[in-house]
Image: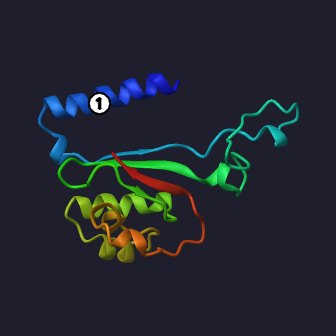
Amino acid sequence: MIKGLDRSVGKILDKLSSLGLEENTLVVFMSDNGGIDASITPRGDGTSNSPFLGGKACLTEGGIRVPLVFRWKGNVPSGQWVDLPIDCTDIYPTLLQAGGYNAKQIVAENDLDGESLMGLLTDSKTKRIAIPKQVITGTILSM
């Protein structure tokens, strides 16, 4: 499955490149929250999310820590790792800001959750500043 996913994402990125759209397209990839922990299934036939404890429906890292990958050639430096708490609700404000909209204003006017991650993605100094969140759900990697 991972090999197939890797091939498919590669085809999408190759197509964006061949069409000259890499610098005009923000690609976001987010996984789901792990497999079902074998210790909580009736027959013990779940999966292992090792090295993390727990899995789907658990509030431990195996259930809430997921990869979140951004790629936007020329705008988001590649090869960065940000290990700060973020939430999937941050994706929408991030897309708004990337599109040139005032994300803070739109979030406030529509009583939405989340905040833009563009500062984390584009400014290496920001990566040292913790963003307070009640739930830790992901780690950002830029490729």
Closest to the observer, 53 or 106: 53
Q: 109 or 136: which is nearer to us?
A: 136
Q: Is residue 99 above or below residue 19?
A: below
Q: Residue at x 38, y 24 (%)?
A: 7
Locate residue 30 relative to residue 13 in the image: left or right. right
Q: Quadrant of the C terminus?
A: top left
> Residue at 63% across / 42% down in the picture?
34
Going by the numbered disc 1, the residue's amino acid type is Ile
The answer to whether residue 30 is left or right of residue 103 is right
Q: Quadrant of residue 127?
A: bottom left
View extreme (left): residue:
20
Residue placed under numbered mark 1 in the picture? 12
Q: Which residue is found at the position 31% from the left and 68% from the top?
A: 119
Image coordinates for residue 112, horizontal then vertical, percent: 44, 69
Q: Secondary structure at mark 1?
A: helix
Asked where in the image residue 128 lies, by quadrant, the reply is bottom left
Residue at image position (31%, 57%) is 95
Residue found farthest to the right: 42
Residue 79 or 85: which is nearer the viewer?
79
